[in-house]
Amino acid sequence: MRTLPLFLAAMLTAAPAQAGVRAIYVSPGAAQPLVVEVADNGDARIGEQGASDYGLLVNGQFYMVGGKPGEWTVARTSDLARAVDATVGPVFGDSLSRTGPARPAATVRLTPGAERNVGGRRGRAYAVAGLDHEKPAAAVEVVVSADPALRPVGQALEGFMNASLIPGAPLLGSGAAELVEETRAIFALGTPLSSEGRFTLQSAETAAIPAARVALPDQPDTYETLVTKMRALVPNKAAK
C-alpha cells in the first residue's frame, strides 16, 4: 500500500520549520545595541553588535566566549562561578548552576499592571520593588512577554546578565548571588521587553540564523583550568 507513505510524506512537507529569531535591544548611553540571535533549534548567541566577546546558549547551558579565531577562550558560566568561589571565597554558591524558582533571598516584589507594546511585541508591565536595598519601596517598570517564541531570547539575556556579574564578583561578595536570585525572579515571568532605565527591545523579527552562529567555537575550559587561571591572577589563594 502506497497510501500511508504518501500521506506521511505530505504531512512532513506541510509541517512548517521552526523559524529563528533576531532580537535587538538598545540601552541608554550604549554605543552599540545588544543582539540576540536564536537558531531554529533554540540555541542562541548574544553580544553587543560588532564585539569580539559574546555569550552562547547551547543545549540549555550558557557559555562566555572571548579571544579571536584560533585562540578562543570558552567557559561555562556555572564553572566560572565555581572557580570564583574556589579562588576568592564564597560568592555565587550554586546560584548559577541550578534552575527553578528564585530562593527567598530574592526580596523583589512584582506587581502586575497594564499590557504594553514594546518593539512590536505585546507584554505586561510589572512594578518591580526591592531592587534598591536602600530604598526598598522604590519600584522600576519591567515589561515582560510570555510569548513562547521569545523564551530562548529571555534565556540568553538572563545568562548574559548573570555572566556580567562575574568580573565584579570579588567586590560584590555574597551580593552577587542575591542579584542572580532577583534576576531569576523577574525572568520567571517571561522575556523582558524593557527594563526602565536599562534596556528596551527595538525589534524582534523572524530570521534565518546559521547553525555555525550558535555553535561553540572550541572546547570549554574545565573547572580545574579556570581555577588555575584565576589563581594566577589572584596570588596566595588556595583552591578549595
Image (spheres, grey):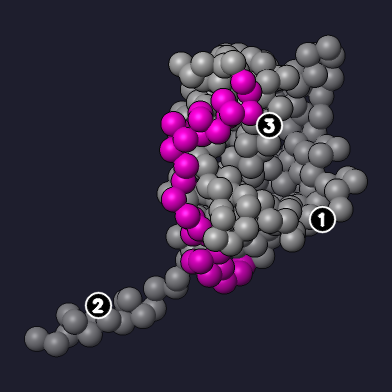
Name the residue: 54% across, 37% down. 77
Q: Is residue 23 above or below residue 164?
A: below
Residue 9 appears in which quarter of the rendering?
Answer: bottom left
Q: Dividing the image into 4 quarters, which one contains the N terminus?
A: bottom left
Residue 42, compared with residue 74, is above or below; it is below
Residue 41, horizontal then vertical, whole percent? 45, 60
At label 1, the amino acid type is Gln
How many numbered badges does the structure rendering display? 3
Q: Quadrant of residue 188?
A: top right
Q: Say which amino acid is labelled 3.
A: Pro
Residue 8: mark in rendering: 2
x and y percent of residue 149 in the render? 55, 55
* Disc 1: which residue: 32
Q: Which residue bears the numbered disc 3?
A: 167
Label 2: how many Cα within 10 Å (few below 14, some 14–19, many 20+): few
**Which badge, 1 or 3, is on the more N-terminal residue?**
1
Q: Position of residue 239 (x, y in %)?
A: 48, 19
